[in-house]
Amino acid sequence: MHFDTMVRGRSVVQETEGSEEDTTTKPNVALPLRLGLEITRLHYLFLVPLILLITPSRAILGMNLPVIGVLTISGLAGNFAGKRPISLLTSISLLFILVWGKVAQDLLRTGPPDTAAFLIEFGMTIFLMEANLVVLTFYKTNDDLKRKDDELSMILHQGLINWVRNQLSLQGMIAIGSLGLSLVLLPIAGLTSISTTELPLTGGLLLVAIIALLFLVTYRREPERR
């Protein structure tokens, strides 16, 4: 179950047993982890322009700059307001634009396609989307816990910090590994005399990347029960 569910369950037990004063010091989030959390929350500031500025303007009717503004604002608003559906919808929109931009680039012949760059951006988008959901869970649960000073809340708070650190580390390693797996297919395609500009190859590479990322990134996503 999610960490916030654990917190709610423990809170019910605590209320029935009565509250006790405790002088336990609240656990602090280490600076590297804090930076990672903030970068993840702000990732729309660099990810949205990165994807939209290389998307052929003909693919989205020359609306690159307006779309950048809309998606950046919606993504940041969803993150800072704690609205998971808004953030998730923004990330899904980015994935759709990224894939459609690649397809349009191949069909409209707007420029030389770069399959490696496409896979890197796709893997980055999937990773940040998944990591962002973890970060949103952390901030929501952290807001609930920081209002309490009892010993049980301190223990849960430290467990929450350990959980988010482990989740982000695990997802980072998985993203790098799955991205490397997909990129390995590029030289293999060259050895088999398949052109990397062909749309079927792009689709095959994309399918492998999706399967590797979604399967591995959801493995052990839930916090362990103690």
Image (cartoon, rainbow, N blue to C red):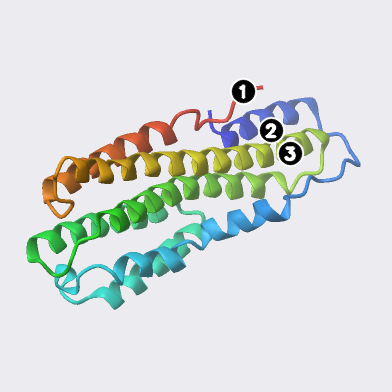
Q: Residue at x 46, y 38 (%)?
A: 174
Foreground residue, 193 or 172? Answer: 193
Q: Residue at x 30, y 72 (%)?
A: 53
Q: Earlier in the sequence, mark 3 or mark 2?
A: 2
Please state which of the two labelled residues, at mark 3 or mark 2, is closer to the viewer. Answer: 3
For label 2, the residue is: 11
Three-letter amino acid code of the residue under disc 3: Gln
Question: Local crowd at mark 1 within 10 Å, few (<14), some, or many (≥20)?
Answer: few
Measured from the top left, where is residue 191 in percent x and y? 20, 42
Q: Work out how far the residue at label 3 is from the one at label 1, CA to CA, in angstroms.
A: 14 Å
Measured from the top left, where is residue 159 in percent x and y? 70, 35
Foreground residue, 166 or 117? Answer: 117
Residue extending farthest to the top is 226
Is 88 displayed left or right of 38 in the figure? left
Three-letter amino acid code of the residue under disc 1: Arg
Question: Local crowd at mark 3 within 10 Å, few (<14), some, or many (≥20)?
Answer: some
Query: Is residue 81 placed above or below 163 in the rendered structure?
Result: below
Q: Residue at x 52, y 30 (%)?
A: 222
For label 1, the residue is: 225
For label 3, the residue is: 158
